Amino acid sequence: EYMDWKYLANVTRLNALALGQLSNAAMPPKNVRITNDQAHDTTLTWDSEPDQTYVVYWRDTASSVWQGSIEVKGKTTVLKK
């Protein structure tokens, strides 16, 4: 008697769409590592899937939003300056 069936149906549709998107997503990279060098740059390395494109996002530690991104295809190292 206290159930909002229309709301529940909308939430169920949204969950189904989200699961569909996740199931079509590419495999994540493996063995992701951050090089611990004492510098202002950040070096990321990973084991890439063949012909896979990844997007690396970054932000200042004081920022609450992503400030930049780069698409990386076929590489296994990114250096952010």
Image (spheres, grey):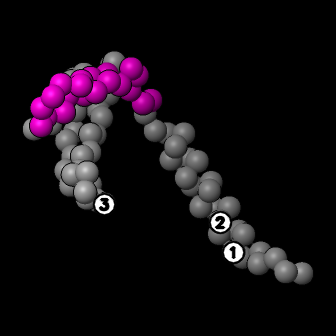
Q: Is residue 8 above or below residue 12?
A: below
**Which amino acid lies under the numbered mark 1 shown in the image of this protein?**
Tyr
Q: What residue span does the magenta drawing correspond to?
A: 27-46
Magenta segment: does it hold 64?
no
Q: Is residue 55 above or below residue 79?
A: below
In the drawing, what numbered circle is on residue 57? Answer: none
* In this rendering, position of residue 27 left or right of residue 80: right
Question: Who's the residue at 28% across and 27% down the image?
Answer: 34
- Which is closer to the viewer, label 2 or label 3? 3
Find the distance from the CA under tag 3 to the CA under tag 1: 31 Å
Question: Who's the residue at 32% across and 24% down the image?
Answer: 33
Q: Are marks 1 and 2 in contact (CB under 8 Å)?
A: yes
Magenta segment: does it hold 37?
yes
x, y percent for residue 32? 35, 25
Q: Which residue is mark 3?
A: 64
Q: Quadrant of the C terminus?
A: top left
x, y percent for residue 18? 55, 52
Most foreground residue, 62 or 55:
62
Question: Who's the residue at 18% across and 25% down the image?
Answer: 37
Most foreground residue, 69 or 25:
69
Q: Quadrant of the N terminus?
A: bottom right
In the drawing, what numbered circle is on residue 7? Answer: 1
**Which amino acid lies under the numbered mark 3 shown in the image of this protein?**
Ser
SS under mark 2: helix
Q: Which residue is mark 2?
A: 11
x, y percent for residue 74? 23, 23
Find the distance from the CA under tag 1 to the CA under tag 2: 6 Å
Question: Who's the residue at 63% across and 62% down the image?
Answer: 13
